[in-house]
Amino acid sequence: MPRIVTQSRTALWRNRLQLAGGYGVLGVLAAAGQAPLGWWPLSLVALVLMFQTLPGAGDARAWGVRLWLAGTGFFGASLFWIVEPFLVEPESHAWMAPFALVGMAAGMALFWALAGWLAARAASGRARLVALVAALVLLELARGWVLTGFPWAMLGHGLIGTPFMQLAAFTGAGGLSLVLLLLALFAVLGKAPGQRAAGALAALALLGGLWLWGGAHATLPPDREGVVRLVQPNAPQAEKWREENIYMFFSRLLDLTSAPASPAPDLVLWPETAVPFLLEHAGDGLMMMADAMAGHGPRTRLGFGVQRIEEGRFFNSLALIDTQAEVLELYDKHHLVPFGEYVPLVERLLGPGYAGFAARQLQGYSPGPGPRVLDLGPLGLALPLICYEAIFPRHLRTPTRPDWVMQITNDAWFGDLSGPYQHLAQARLRAVEQGLPVLRVANTGVSAVIDARGGVVAALELGATGYLDMPLPGALPPTFYARLGDWPVLLLLLTLLGGAALAGRASTPMR
């Protein structure tokens, strides 16, 4: 008898491990749509397989566990670049990298687990899958707000760069996730073979219709007058602040800025934290920068990322100077990276300014007052965003609509595999959502000029040193999403969830 029990337990654990591995692999495959791969058909197949196996899970707890396993695989594969900051100083921080990745993946997967649990509680029968689609997108949108928010690696991000992306002008990223999940849902919703065939045809019709519709939205407004130079110094994070390299990288920025051009640039942009001094203690630094751009004419301006101090508090900022080295505009980053630029719990207990990974000073950064639009004269109104701020759609919906978005970033923190490309992809999505061009300049790349439809007009590749001189793309009229945000999609998702709950009560529970 004891032997029989042991064999049963062994078989039980083997089945559990197979279940965990199967759902984890499906999650990894679902992540194939994320940049730089962009294999969204593989993501779709993985979601179809996940939906096909889920009805066999009985109670809400089982659904939650299976979705958590799939989510852990998905976020582990999508976010593996988060180990990179720990490798900048490996002798001190490398040991934390695997814990950070596993913790992040398992933590983000809780949103998927909650969606599974909620769907199974709200509905029964095959209506649970409809409820799951609505709950997954609702929880994705919630990720943009919970604990200051982290809307990275949304399922819909896999459709960036395809004609489907144009739907974001009406729905935002949530609508893209909804489309991908609906395509998977239609493929599995029917019970009988004829119903499944009809569902597959419906999925193909939706896919083809949106593809053709998105491809037809290709018209663009004319470029604005004026030229912007994006300067990419290519300073790897592990080398950027070494004493022997500081002047070399600063000189590289100056040389790239002073390079002649016809027509001359009206604005030169440097990346985040580009200069090796505090704004208040620049010495001759600002005048050297002004001299570097003076050859382009007295109207040229230089925008650059800089750290500054005010009343004992440090800020991650963007400053704009003229050819006389006078600071014309100043913007302080307001949405800081938790544990990267400040430590939330320590700050609450001991006061502001305790350092994270990205802070060079003994103290961390303090947040600025919020988004603001800069008047750049002939170049129109620009909305500055620093790095991480560009992943939040809400930061682009300002009371005064800008003419374009200016993003400075230091993606060297994200490594050279997936992180910088995912960040670039989200900048493209912001352009479509708002109908605004985005000009982003990154320390190591990818620096790019993005038009109002999300197309990459020109780019400096990852790891390249150089500059781009490009005319400023024109803006489209305010999009539906720019006017109403996520509210229409939220109402649609709540309707789907409520309808699935009502339909599920009338159906036979799954066995």
Image (cartoon, helix red, strand yellow):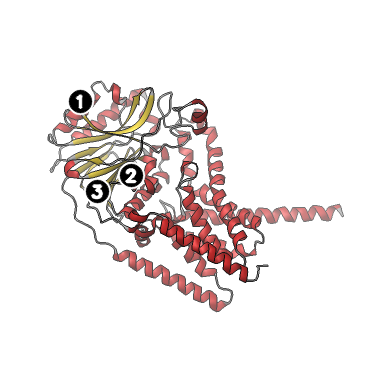
359 or 396, nearer to the observer:
396
Report, in whole angstroms, how far the alpha carbon at label 1 lies from the one at label 3: 29 Å
Q: What element carries label 2?
A: loop
Residues under numbered marks 1 and 2 in contact, where contact means CB atoms less than 8 Å apart: no
Residue at the spot of label 1 = 287
Identify the residue shown where x is 35% and y is 25%.
309
Report, in whole angstroms, how far the alpha carbon at label 1 lies from the one at label 2: 28 Å
Query: x%, y% of residue 360?
Result: 40, 27
Query: x%, y% of residue 135?
Result: 53, 57
Residue at the spot of label 3 = 403
Q: Quadrant of residue 467?
A: top left
Q: In which quarter of the image is residue 55?
A: bottom right
Q: Is mark 3 on a helix, strand or loop?
A: loop
Q: Earlier in the sequence, mark 2 or mark 3?
A: 3
Judge whether 418 appears above or below 8 on screen: above
Numbered disc in front, either 1 or 2: 1
Residue at the spot of label 2 = 446
The answer to whether residue 439 is left or right of residue 35 is left
Q: Earlier in the sequence, mark 1 or mark 2?
A: 1
Query: x%, y% of residue 159?
Result: 40, 58
Say what amino acid the circle numbered 3 marks. Answer: Asp
Say what amino acid the circle numbered 1 marks. Answer: Met
Say what amino acid the circle numbered 2 marks. Answer: Val
Judge whether 245 appears above or below 267 on screen: above
Report, in whole angstroms, how far the alpha carbon at label 2 lies from the one at label 3: 22 Å
* Residue 397 makes an appearance in the image: yes
